[in-house]
Amino acid sequence: MTETTTAHGTGGPAGRGPAAAGTPASTTFASLSLVPKAAARQSMKDFKSDQEVRWCPGCGDYAILAAVQGFMPELGVAKENIVFVSGIGCSSRFPYYMNTYGMHSIHGRAPAIATGLATSRQDLSVWVVTGDGDALSIGGNHLIHALRRNVNLKILLFNNRIYGLTKGQYSPTSEIGKITKSTPMGSLDVPFNPVSLALGAEASFVARTVDSDRKHLTEVLRQAAAHPGTALVEIYQNCNIFNDGAFEALKDQQQAEEAVIRLEHGQPIRFGPDRAKGVVRDPATGDLQVVEVTPDNEAQVLIHDAHSASPTTAFALSRLADPDTLHHTPIGVFRSVDRPVYDTLMAGQLDTAVEQNGKGDLAALMAGGDTWTVIG
Amino acid sequence: MTSKVSSTTEQADGADGALVGGQRKPAGTKDVRRLDRVIIRFAGDSGDGMQLTGDRFTSETASFGNDLSTLPNFPAEIRAPAGTLPGVSSFQLHFADHDILTPGDAPDVLVAMNPAALKANVGDLPRGAEIIVNTDEFTRRAMQKVGYAVSPLEDGSLDGYQIHPVPLTTLTVEALKEFALSRKEAERSKNMFALGLLSWMYHRPTEGTERFLRTKFAKKPDIAAANIAAFRAGWNFGETTEDFAVSYEVAPAATAFPTGTYRNISGNLALSYGLVAASRQAELPLYLGSYPITPASDILHELSKHKNFGVRTFQAEDEIAGIGAALGAAFGGSLAVTTTSGPGVALKSETIGLAVSLELPLLIVDIQRGGPSTGLPTKTEQADLLQAMYGRNGEAPVPVIAPRTPADCFQAALEAARIALVYRTPVFLLSDGYLANGSEPWRIPELEELPDLRVEFAQGPNHTLDDGTQAFWPYKRDPQTLARPWAVPGTPGLEHRIGGIEKQDGTGNISYDPANHDFMVRTRQAKIDNIAVADLEVDDPGNTARTLVLGWGSTYGPITAAVRRLRTAGEHIAQAHLRHLNPFPKNLGTVLAAYDKVVIPEMNLGQLATLIRAKYLVDADSYNQVNGMPFKAEQLATALKEAIDD
Ligand SMILES: Cc1ncc(C[n+]2csc(CCOP(=O)(O)OP(=O)(O)O)c2C)c(N)n1
Ligand code: SF4
Ligand SMILES: [Mg+2]
């Protein structure tokens, strides 16, 4: 028999059900201030669903799943108030494996659906899981608009630079000349750089991390989760079936030292063996360039400022990477700035409307305008 | 039983010529004739303010207590080239001392603000109709623009009509000479002069319009004063000039209306109020995800004014995001709505399919317009029925309902919400441009009359596993309705995942099992097929008819008017009108079988007829019109007469 309770008298836009009446206490995550806290400590295992994970053995998605499940308890919020929404793709199967609320929706539309959920329920922590095709091809429009609105969503973009689920066509992040089933003579289109794209779309939080670096991935998730507004996290993910080794340059011990630039807020942007290389601004063009650090130019090495009001330097950093070799790929948080959050503003307008006009009175609304009465 | 009408706005009920409380009364020195009904059409350039003029005349008429029906008709361009035929905008109003059903076939009176307006509309007038023309605009150039080589006012071509040549522009400018306005600015008030004249002719109450102008131009008191002056000058012109020897009275339609408080309402406004009412009755917050499109945008505009009702309106980046956001809100426990027109429905189809699969409540409001593609954005049509029924991949049944008149949009919205909430399904509400913009009197319902739409969210486990443990199964159905539980995020212990991939019956887990898919497809269909809808009522006085006319949606007015004409002429014809297009009422088959002939008039090429023929194997006759305009009663009466005689 279905055990149900009635929704009577709970017409408020957010926070129905007993969980909403829980005890939201202060949390380290500003973005989650309206989300009820977990009653008891949670562990990674609480976030594993009973569904068998069905990615190809060796797929980078496993590592990301483990990292996310491992991180979730840290949020400290009731897991029934966490929702994962995804589109379509290998990566978008993610919600099935999380023991939270979840929706595996349709191709590209997860940001739109999540926007409706997040703007109507501020008591939820809403996460979007998407792929490079899902987010940047079919769903490109929704992604950029979610970013510019700054809805309280955490978007995890699994970038494997390929269409995994449809068996290996090139994607909007594939390098030019990519040979795939649909491009036997090489792909023709210039790839998107998701970080550049997000910065151009007015994103308030943009980060990049790599599936195989659990520690870095977790730290980025932590910062994203704490960010009030839309956070875009690009996660380089290996598809060992259709694009194996796509990020090898960033993973191979030796190459990585040359290739990866780890961004840390407030720290000089240096990398390479003995941190011998640094990023400086070219005084002639204003653009960024990589130089050998010498005592003469050491003072010019850029200090990373993720909170800079202007996205210009973050954008320039996003352009350092070579799309083919991935050399000079910055990872970490490019940008994290405070900006009004759409759902908060929307809720604010509702409150203001009540302050200004009183709580809606249906009888008065219907009887507005010129009326006349017919009496028997 | 006799009824009488009392109005909150003062009304002309005497003829003493005095200004009582700002209310103008005819002086009584001229002939007054009584009419039972009148059809007026205001026509001018799209920049002439004809819609506003029509609206005001309608409000005056509504507050006077006549029954009425309106038909605004305007070009898709905001300002089509001035003085051209495509730029003509018109507003037709039919009002009467008895209940009426349509905006009328042919105007008794045409107000033509320029040659283009005359040329575009004169063909619709019966001989003997009155035409008030603004002679000032009949310059050689303006006439040439629309192909009049000689002035139609002088060449005898209008001999069959009663022409009132009035230099509306000059008179308006003259009336406003004391105002510090440029000639151009003063000319703009000519529509108010015309409105004043017509208000005199038909004894309309004027206070409402004066109050309206004061409010509308509250920030520009001199413009308000100028418009009021022009309005009064028009009224006085009628009173004094000899050209207008008669004025007319159309008594309030007191006996046509049941007791109650009334207002005039357009379809889109009624639909908006219906949604707000549904939210209140369901005790669920209303969430609208929408993308602007004619003729649906007014609902987005209206609902965004009512944030103090807890209404959230989200103007999305496109139609897909509009419905996506609505679906997300539905998952979260809102009463979710998306509003659009045909092209938007095309974009939303994939998400509607997802909603069918997720089995969440969602209202899809389609204000139909002429198609295909961009089609005729500002004109009406009923050609999205099959799109609503079948426009998705896979077996994706969606309930479809349609309002029949502008005011009925209110009830239709409540009914759509009921079905969506009880059966956890997306529901199509098919209105159209004619209902959306047309208006009629509406008896404002008492709150107690509104249906109880409250829902129960799932709150705990609903299933016992073999090992005795309690579990929550998101696809375990209510045995009666086949609805699945609505478990909103935030409910502890009910964490679950849903998606567009086929689900295992009960658990909702991904399943590719062939037998399960077959079962799920049939179960989703059965859920929709078994929705409880009211039986179809048939109007067949004396059960004498052999021919049934069956309609749906906005054809109700014209069909009913045609049926009345036929019956007055002694014909026997039965009439039935469908609110529910999917599922059809259970008794529809029996109803159809009871008649020798079934005629289905539609503003499409026979979409309902196709459904009826397929489902009931009835050789229904289709009668179609797709010219962007509603049927005319006379035309339908003729067609139905042929069917009866056939
Ligand atoms: C409307 C629609 N078009 C196409 C598809 C087929 N399709 C499914 S996933 C996919 C691409 C997925 O690529 P990506 O987003 O990069 O995800 P990945 O599988 O690589 O994780 C495509 C084209 C679909 N499911 N729906
Ligand atoms: S195809 Fe690639 S992305 Fe998809 S599951 Fe297999 S390895 Fe992972
Ligand atoms: Mg991919």
Image (cartoon, coloured by chain):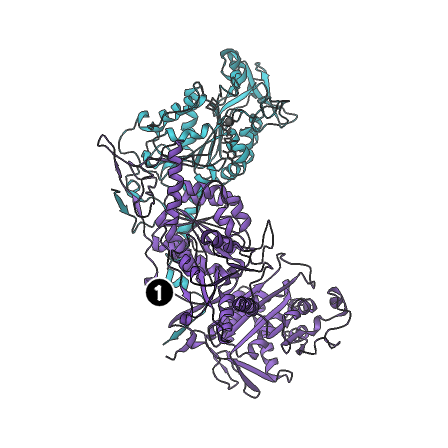
Chain colours: A cyan, B purple
Mark 1: which amino acid? Answer: Glu
Q: Under 8 Å from ligand 1: the CB of mark 1?
A: no
Q: Is residue A83 visible?
A: no
How many discs mark residues in the rendered view? 1
Q: Is B98 drawn above or below residue B593 in the view shown? A: below
Disc 1 designates what residue?
B446
- Rendering quarter of residue B201: bottom right
Q: Is B252 drawn above or below residue B514 in the view shown? A: below
Q: Residue at x 33, y 48 (%)?
A: B481
Image quadrant holding the N terminus of chain B, namely bottom left
Q: Quick one: B578 or B266, which is closer to the camera? A: B578
Image quadrant holding the C terminus of chain B, namely bottom right
Image coordinates for residue B510, horizontal then vertical, percent: 38, 32
Image coordinates for residue A184, horizontal then vertical, percent: 62, 22
Q: Quick one: A302 or A8, which is closer to the camera? A: A8
Image coordinates for residue B453, horizontal then vertical, percent: 34, 54
Circle 1 Cα neighbour tier, 10 Å, few/some/many (<14 / 14–19 / ≥20): few
Q: Along the horizontal axis of the image, is A287 left or right of A86?
A: right
Q: Which residue, as the protein is rendered here, is positioned at the far bottom?
A: B29
Q: Along the horizontal axis of the image, is B48 left or right of A91?
A: right
Q: Is B43 drawn above or below residue B295 in the view shown? A: below
Q: Residue at x 42, y 29 (%)?
A: A93
The chain identifier of the residue carrying mark 1 reads: B
Q: Along the horizontal axis of the image, is B16 left or right of B310?
A: right
Q: Is A228 drawn above or below residue B638 in the view shown? A: above
Q: Quick one: A225 or B225, which is closer to the camera? A: A225
Q: Is residue B351 visible?
A: yes
Q: Which residue, as the protein is rendered here, is positioned at the far left?
A: B468
Image coordinates for residue A280, horizontal then vertical, percent: 58, 22
Q: Quick one: B551 or A236, which is closer to the camera? A: B551
Kind of element beneath mark 1: loop
